């Protein structure tokens, strides 16, 4: 039973009819009843869509039962009758028959699939898949076939599948032949290729033909070389396996050709794996960027490290949670818009808290960076405990809107939508900040204060106002980050703590000279992390990164993009 | 030379402090062991252990104060040195278990048997020897501090950057010690100790001796710190704290001054950790948590940094508060701690000791209306203008 | 500028740029032993930056900086340069504010700077006498136990000069020593510096022309990071370029 489930769940992700069909055929090699049952079920699922010929069960059962008794001639006729229905459920019956595994109960003449069970056979209805009880083995008889019947059956299956009118059936048939790579199918393939118009199916058929050619002994060198090239060019996931097994059996003069195709494929594979890592790294980097960029701004402009920054992220995530709760209770239809509603709310909430912190605490500690660090740490404890008191210490469930769930297949890379959106969101936030810093009056003032606070103040810039706005902006961005992180991480009071050290590392690594430093820092750390992970493991990778940063800061004590000038040195 | 330096260190305040600590080392064990329970003056066992723990915290705070209060290095990773010293002691205690573990394996600690290890890793060798283990208690934190400090101070990583990488250091160690294959018991750490120097670890006499040892160690730390702080090197440390680059132009090698303070401090923290572990009976990676290290900073700040008594008072008071809160009002503890961080930095930059100093100088002025002479009240303020030999 | 032997300070073709801005531009300068050199020049001329280069705070992009005719200063750090015997008084007086006047001087006193030497240092009678002596010279004897933070601006200037004396350097770099001093103190300072210059080399940067006149030394005028004019004060202040760029009117 579990195999059925497993298989069905497997299908859910595979999902296309074609792949269902191909799975079916491959699974015929299995010798267990359960497997066959699965096949049948899957077959029924796969072909039950409208447009397929589907005779009533009874009628088809009668035709199947007609396979026994009788002589080979009768059987020939019975097969023809089965084929004539065009019912796909006949295909497995024919296949089992061709393999000589179809049995009939002598007493009733019922034809059935069998499974050995002690000295008995457990019977299954070939059409409905229903269990038919057990019968002593001696009370059954094999439905025999001879060579000429086997040929007929193969052709028939071919006609029902490879030459079927339905493109999906043809594709799955081609795929199944590709898997089995039985040289006996070569003629059938040639016939099918001659009339096939659909390019995708053609490719599969050609690939199948090439694989068969590679396997065969009595094929010319040129043909095999050609076949190796076809396999290599197909880009199929199995190409490496196919070629590797072909390499073992290939004649010596063919080996270099196959080997070089194989090398090329492996290079490609490595490149794709690297690309996958880069994607994971970019995705982690975006998260780090979101978490760190607000920190970098406040640190750059005010020279203070906000230890409560992580808690701003956490508050952003809880805002999302609260918004979703309200929506769930009052307007479930709006759920898909929950994030859009949460974003401005989170920004406002955290920005206001940030401004309050700046006005209430930080401004009194101006010029004492280390004290600020301690005071904001104290605030972070208070914020954490407040949230814990209100929402409880456990993880809160924040849902993904429909457009955030699932994944998209991108040239073989499977990208989850939540990650894709977070990367996009990080880019948007980054660009927006660039615009704010470079194109607005506040940005100009912020940059002036960053470069020379005293000078800026002498020029009439209200540095206290700039400080408050900077802190508000930095905290607000943390709130936005929290909304994004609520989609991929557990929302708990400790959420912020998990990101704060990583964010520091980004800031320390990238420097605070400008925003690009944070971008470079976040992406470098993200990607480095993901590349180290496969070799060192997640934890060791992280430790390595920390050690590398500690060493890096020896070379550049103020990060990659450092602030310059006399004011910094003081 | 040394005697002169020591003599100078023993100003009135230091003598008092050391005297009190030595007295505690004698009186508390005596009151615990000699006065029978229920009678007036008896100190219960749990209190001995609890105060022993506070004293080891005080030693850690004093160590931090040496680098932060006097040298301006805000280390957010001092818990790491404390934990490393603790682990070294824990390893000795693990080896003392012998075959009394769950798996009764005389060669390997239980967790290694559990992990299917066949032999003792090389870095566990020698830890069955107490003297060696004590050497490691000092060497391991000392060497880590030396390497880390050498790299950081040489390249002039200062201020917030330094604080952050010290935090990264302890965080990296936290992650590392959580790993089972590090060979330090992973998540669970080292525990189930049986005896220390042949004495059962839970026996009242052992506990009382551990308390006495901690008090004496703290007294020695006070002596060492006082010696350093009141020497010319101590003045240079303060100079580095206040105007690092100016000190350089005077010809002092700031990086070495800092390195000296950092290593001495790390060794002290390591010893404090080694005294802490047998009293609480466990050491686990949680001790490396960056939050712990920051908490040490607040003990020091509450008491008064840049003074010798301050961190000791701060560590004891805050931890008493913590014991009370976590018992009586657990959900309020973090609020209280957070408020302490904010309040102390905003309103009490010199801590309790600074406050007392201010109060004392205020009252003296009101009572006497006399021109001030540099006296004890300024000493209290922590910026000790030392009476000159020339006077 | 070729004979380096016999010079105390030798700068040749020194340039430094900050983000493309040339603060020092092909600067060449010589100071001989027991000689005083006064440097004048408009704000931003690069006078302080020049001192930064000599004392190792700023690395030049180009050029040669030699001490005592042979030691390449561009390869040494601040502490090593100070220990060679180069003392510096900063434009903005920087003393150790939370320590007493006495301690400031004690730290500056020329003594071994090693960690353990400092740890076990005890002032002997000679050291105490020397500090008392300096205290008298800078007229801070009555404030020796006060915190440096409580001194007035001018007193901090004096304290820093005292620290410079305590260091007993071979070459003194003095950046605007008389800013914030009274006229009589200014004259006093000039006298002190002249006295020092009988045995050591002194480089003084000042904007106060009467003070520079009191110094009675060779004068170099810097502008835009390069030497504009050299000679006696009369020669330099008569130079039309100097009048146009610095003195004005
Ligand atoms: N670290 C630095 N980064 C950027 N610019 C610098 C730096 N140091 C000096 N400068 C620039 O170099 C120029 C020379 O400065 P410097 O302080 O040497 O002038 P100065 O001659 O001492 O002026 P003043 O008479 O006002 O003291 C100035 O324009 C200054 O802004
Ligand atoms: Mg200047």
Image: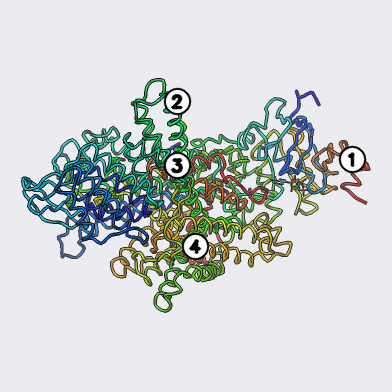
Disc 2 + disc 3, Cβ < 8 Å: no
x, y (%) of residue A531? 45, 42
Mark toward the viewer: 2 or 1? 2
Give the residue displayed 53% in from the left and 57% down from the top: A424
Labelled disc at residue C236: 1
Q: CA distance from mark 1 to mark 3?
A: 91 Å
x, y (%) of residue C158? 70, 49
Mark toward the viewer: 1 or 3? 3
Marks 2 and 1 on same chain: no
Mark 2: few/some/many CA within 10 Å (<14, 14-19, 20+): few
Which residue was labeled with disc 2? A222
| Vertical position of residue B143 compared to residue A328: above or below | above
Q: CA distance from mark 2 to mark 3?
A: 20 Å
Q: CA distance from mark 1 to mark 4?
A: 55 Å
| Vertical position of residue A130 compared to residue C177: above or below | below
Chain identifier of the residue bearing label 4 in the image:
B
Q: Quadrant of the N terminus of chain B?
A: top left
Whether residue A529 appears in this view of the structure is no
Disc 3 + disc 4, Cβ < 8 Å: no
Labelled disc at residue B345: 4
Mark 4: few/some/many CA within 10 Å (<14, 14-19, 20+): many
Chain identifier of the residue bearing label 1 in the image:
C
Which residue was labeled with disc 3? A203
Q: Which mark sits nearer the N-terminus, 2 or 3?
A: 3
């Amino acid at each position: 039973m579990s195999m059925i489930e497993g298989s069905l769940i497997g299908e859910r992700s595979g999902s296309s009819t074609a792949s269902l069909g191909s799975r079916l055929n491959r699974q015929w090699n299995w010798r267990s009843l359960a497997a066959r049952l699965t096949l049948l079920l899957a077959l029924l699922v796969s072909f039950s869509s409208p447009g397929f010929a589907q005779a009533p069960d009874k009628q088809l059962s009668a035709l199947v039962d007609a396979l026994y008794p009788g002589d080979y001639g009768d059987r020939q006729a019975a097969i023809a009758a089965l084929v004539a229905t065009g019912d796909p459920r006949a295909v497995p019956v024919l296949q089992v028959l061709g393999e000589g595994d179809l049995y009939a109960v002598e007493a009733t003449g019922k034809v059935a699939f069998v499974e050995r069970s002690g000295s008995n056979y457990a019977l299954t209805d070939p059409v409905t898949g229903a269990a038919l009880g057990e019968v002593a083995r001696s009370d059954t008889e094999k439905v025999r076939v001879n060579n000429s019947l086997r040929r007929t059956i193969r052709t028939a299956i071919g006609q029902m599948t490879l030459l079927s009118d339905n493109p999906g059936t043809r594709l799955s048939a081609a795929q199944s032949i590709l898997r089995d790579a039985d040289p006996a199918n070569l003629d059938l393939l040639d016939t099918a290729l001659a009339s096939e118009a659909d390019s995708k199916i053609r490719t599969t058929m050609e690939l199948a033909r090439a694989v068969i050619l590679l396997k065969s002994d009595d094929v010319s060198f040129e043909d095999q070389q050609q076949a190796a090239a076809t396999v290599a060019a197909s880009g199929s996931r199995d190409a490496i396996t196919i070629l590797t097994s072909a390499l073992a059996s290939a004649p010596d003069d063919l080996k270099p050709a196959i080997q070089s195709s194989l090398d090329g494929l492996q290079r490609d594979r490595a490149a794709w794996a690297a690309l996958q890592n880069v994607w994971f790294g970019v995705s982690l980097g975006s998260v780090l960027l979101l978490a760190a960029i607000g920190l970098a701004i406040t640190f750059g402009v005010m020279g203070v490290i906000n230890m409560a920054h992580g808690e701003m992220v956490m508050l952003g995530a809880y805002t999302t949670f609260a918004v979703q709760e309200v929506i769930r209770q009052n307007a479930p239809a709006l759920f898909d818009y929950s994030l859009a509603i949460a974003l401005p709310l989170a920004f406002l909430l955290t920005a206001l808290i940030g401004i309050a912190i700046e006005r209430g605490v930080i401004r009194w500690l101006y010029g004492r960076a280390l004290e600020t660090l301690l005071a904001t740490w104290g605030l972070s404890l208070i914020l954490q405990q407040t949230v814990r008191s209100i929402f409880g210490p456990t993880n809160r469930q924040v849902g993904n809107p429909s457009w955030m769930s699932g994944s998209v297949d991108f040239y073989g890379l499977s990208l989850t939508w939540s990650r894709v959106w977070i990367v996009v969101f990080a880019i948007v936030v980054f660009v927006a900040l660039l615009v704010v810093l470079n194109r607005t009056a506040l940005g100009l003032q912020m940059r002036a204060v960053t470069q020379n606070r005293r000078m800026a103040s002498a020029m009439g810039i209200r540095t206290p106002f700039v400080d408050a706005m900077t802190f508000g902006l930095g905290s607000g961005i943390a709130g936005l980050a929290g909304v994004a992180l609520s989609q991929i991480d557990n929302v708990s009071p400790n959420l912020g703590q998990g990101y704060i050290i990583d964010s520091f590392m980004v800031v320390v690594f990238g420097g605070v000279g400008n925003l690009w430093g944070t971008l470079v820092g976040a992406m470098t750390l993200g990607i480095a992390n993901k590349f180290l992970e496969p070799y060192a493991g997640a934890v060791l990778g992280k430790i390595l990164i920390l050690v590398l940063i500690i060493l890096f800061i020896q070379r550049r004590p103020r990060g990659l993009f450092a602030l310059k000038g006399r004011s910094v040195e003081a | 030379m040394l005697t002169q330096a020591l003599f100078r260190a023993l100003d009135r305040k230091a003598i008092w402090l050391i005297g009190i600590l030595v007295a505690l080392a004698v009186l508390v064990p005596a009151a615990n062991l000699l006065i029978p329970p229920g009678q007036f003056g008896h100190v219960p066992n749990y209190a001995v252990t609890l105060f022993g723990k506070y004293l080891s915290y005080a030693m850690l705070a004093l160590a931090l104060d040496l680098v932060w209060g006097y040298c301006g290095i805000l280390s957010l990773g001092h818990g790491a040195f404390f934990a490393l010293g603790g682990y070294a002691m824990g390893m000795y205690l693990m080896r003392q278990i012998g075959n009394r573990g769950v798996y009764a394996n005389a060669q390997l600690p239980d967790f290694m048997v559990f992990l299917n290890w066949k032999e003792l890793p090389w870095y566990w060798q020698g830890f069955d020897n107490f003297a060696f283990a004590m050497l490691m208690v000092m060497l391991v934190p000392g060497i880590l501090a030396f390497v880390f400090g050498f790299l950081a101070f040489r390249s002039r990583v200062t201020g917030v950057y330094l604080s952050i990488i010290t935090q990264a250091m302890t965080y990296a160690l936290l992650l590392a010690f959580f790993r089972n294959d590090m060979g330090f018991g992973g998540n669970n750490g080292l525990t189930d100790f049986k005896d220390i120097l042949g004495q059962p670890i839970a026996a009242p006499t052992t506990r009382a001796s551990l308390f006495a040892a901690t008090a004496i160690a703290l007294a020695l730390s006070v002596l060492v710190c006082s010696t350093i702080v009141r020497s010319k090197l101590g003045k240079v440390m303060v100079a580095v704290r206040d105007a690092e680059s100016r000190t350089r132009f005077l010809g002092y090698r700031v990086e070495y001054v800092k390195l000296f303070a950092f290593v001495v401090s790390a060794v002290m923290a390591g010893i404090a950790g080694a005294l802490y572990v047998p009293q609480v009976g466990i050491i686990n990676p949680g001790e490396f948590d960056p939050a712990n290290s920051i908490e040490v900073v607040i003990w020091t700040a509450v008491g008064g940094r840049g003074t010798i008594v301050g961190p000791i008072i701060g560590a004891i008071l805050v931890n008493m508060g913590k014991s009370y809160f976590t018992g009586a009002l657990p959900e309020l503890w973090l609020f209280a701690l957070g408020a302490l961080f904010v309040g102390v930095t905003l309103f009490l930059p010199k801590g309790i000791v600074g406050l007392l100093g201010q109060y004392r100088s205020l009252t003296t002025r009101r009572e006497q209306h006399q021109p001030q002479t540099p006296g004890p009240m300024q000493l209290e303020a922590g910026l000790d203008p030392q009476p000159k030999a020339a006077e | 500028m070729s004979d380096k032997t016999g010079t105390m300070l030798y700068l040749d073709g020194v340039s430094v740029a900050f983000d493309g801005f040339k603060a020092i531009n092909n600067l060449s300068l010589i100071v001989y032993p027991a000689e005083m050199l006064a440097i004048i020049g408009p704000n931003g001329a690069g006078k302080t930056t020049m001192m930064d280069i000599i004392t190792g705070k700023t690395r030049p992009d180009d050029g040669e900086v030699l001490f005592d005719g042979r030691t390449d200063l561009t390869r040494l750090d601040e502490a090593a340069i100070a220990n060679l015997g180069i003392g510096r008084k900063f434009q903005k007086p920087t003393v150790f504010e939370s320590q007493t006047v006495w301690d400031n001087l004690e730290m500056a006193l020329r003594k071994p700077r090693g960690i353990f030497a400092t740890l076990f240092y005890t002032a002997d009678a000679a050291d105490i006498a020397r500090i008392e002596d300096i205290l008298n010279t800078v007229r801070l004897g009555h404030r020796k136990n006060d915190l440096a933070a409580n001194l007035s601006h001018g007193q901090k200037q004096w304290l820093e000069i005292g620290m410079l004396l305590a260091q007993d350097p071979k070459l003194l770099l003095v950046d605007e020593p008389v800013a914030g001093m009274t006229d009589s103190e200014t004259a006093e300072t000039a006298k002190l510096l002249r006295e020092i210059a009988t045995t050591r080399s002194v480089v003084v940067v000042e904007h106060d022309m009467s003070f520079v006149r009191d110094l009675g030394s060779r004068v170099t005028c810097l502008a835009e990071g390069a030497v504009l004019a050299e000679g006696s004060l009369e020669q330099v202040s008569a130079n039309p370029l100097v009048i146009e760029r610095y003195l004005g009117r």
